[in-house]
Image (cartoon, helix red, strand yellow):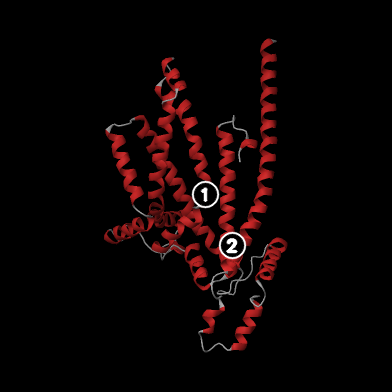
Amino acid sequence: MTTVSTRGKLRSSWDGFIEALTSETTVYVVKRLLQALLTLLLASALSFFIIQMAPGDYLDTLRENPKISPERLEQLKQQFGLDKSWPEQYGRWLWQVVTQGDFGTSFAYNRSVASLLWERVPATLLIAISSLIFTWLVAIPMGIVGAIYQQRWIDRVLQVLSYSGQGFPSFITALLLLIFAQNTSPLFPVGDMTSIDHADLTPLGKILDIGWHMILPTIALSVASFAGLQRIMRGQLLDVLRQDYIQTARAKGLPENKVVYVHALRNAINPIITLLGFEFAGLLSGAFIAEFFFNWPGLGRLILQALLVQDLYLVMASLMMGAVMLIVGNLLADLLLKAVDPRINLADIN
């Protein structure tokens, strides 16, 4: 009877905890989404007017072409809404986004901005997310090993690798990988994300083909990131391992693996999870360098060209995409912190 009663109380307590957690999380997510709407509104307005402060506009390039008549230029000016004031242009754009989900028409491509982005987003996200996963799978274990074997030869080797990785900018790493690919050709393909005979391959062959093309761009994106993340993980774990409660756990005779991976790592990982928000936000911008060097068909070249020719609505959509990634990344990091450490009160965050 006592056992049944105890199980009932435990089940009731667990159900109450889940209900409270779900309620707290829902309220927090709704609150953050409402804040995100205001943030996106302010960010879009600021971005729009900063772009407009740049001298000239998209039509300046067309004016240099003698084959385009002044009448045609005037038609294009009216078609793109460039004959209106900045507030009017922004108001029209914002109204289209809110009511129709329409981010406008690209000046250079004369196509819907949304369709242009959706063509390139999968390729960019593929390489960016693979880089993020690879970075964390490599950096976290290396940081843990460095902390556990502090000042031993393996820790010194990892520190050398870390400092070396941080000392190379992404474009230098990409350039070195290109030289390596050239000297080992055709071992590592460079250029595009598929081979010439990609369409003739089996489904598994297509996946392997894309994966093989991703190796060098992923490494180029990951080197600097994993070097910094490894050092942060090592430092955080070392700080936790020096805490009194860790010494107490060891004095009680707990196995070292349990002390490190159960007690210490759980507290050391929290600041690392916070970084995930910024890592997620930088997925798109971080991939641009690798896309440029390895001719990866992503957003990099598209947005760079849009900036050069002042393709207003295409630039605006890319900036809003980056802002959304930042908001989603921070929200994801907060929820992961709550999942890892239930003691954290979401209401106290921010």
> What residue is at 65 percent from the left and 45 percent from the top?
32
Q: Secondary structure at mark 2?
A: helix
Query: From mark 1 to mark 2, how far is it between C-alphas?
Result: 21 Å
Which is closer to the viewer, label 1 or label 2?
2
- Name the residue rendered at 68%, 35% in the picture: 24
Query: In the rendered view of the protein, which quadrant contains the C terminus?
Result: top right
163 relative to 2, above or below: below
Residue 203: give x, y in percent of width and height: 48, 56
Q: Residue at x 37, y 38 (%)?
A: 142
- The residue to which callout 1 is attached is 280
Residue 243 placement: quadrant: top left
* Residue, disc 2: 47
Q: Is residue 41 visible?
A: yes
Question: In which quadrant will I find the N terminus?
Answer: top right
Mark 2 residue crowding within 10 angstroms, few (<14) / some (14–19) / many (20+): some
Q: Tell me which amino acid carries mark 1.
A: Phe
The amino acid on which the numbered mark 2 sits, given as a three-letter code, is Ser
The picture places residue 184, in percent across and down from the top left corner, at: 28, 58
Q: Residues within 10 Å of mark 1 (few under 14, many from 20)?
A: many
> Quick check: 240 left or right of 109?
left
Tell me what residue is drawn at x 54 percent, y 84 percent.
Answer: 63
Relative depth, front residue between 10 and 4: 10
Q: Position of residue 273 (x, y in %)?
A: 51, 39
**Location of residue 174 by image quarter:** bottom left
Numbered tag placed on residue 187 in the rendering: none
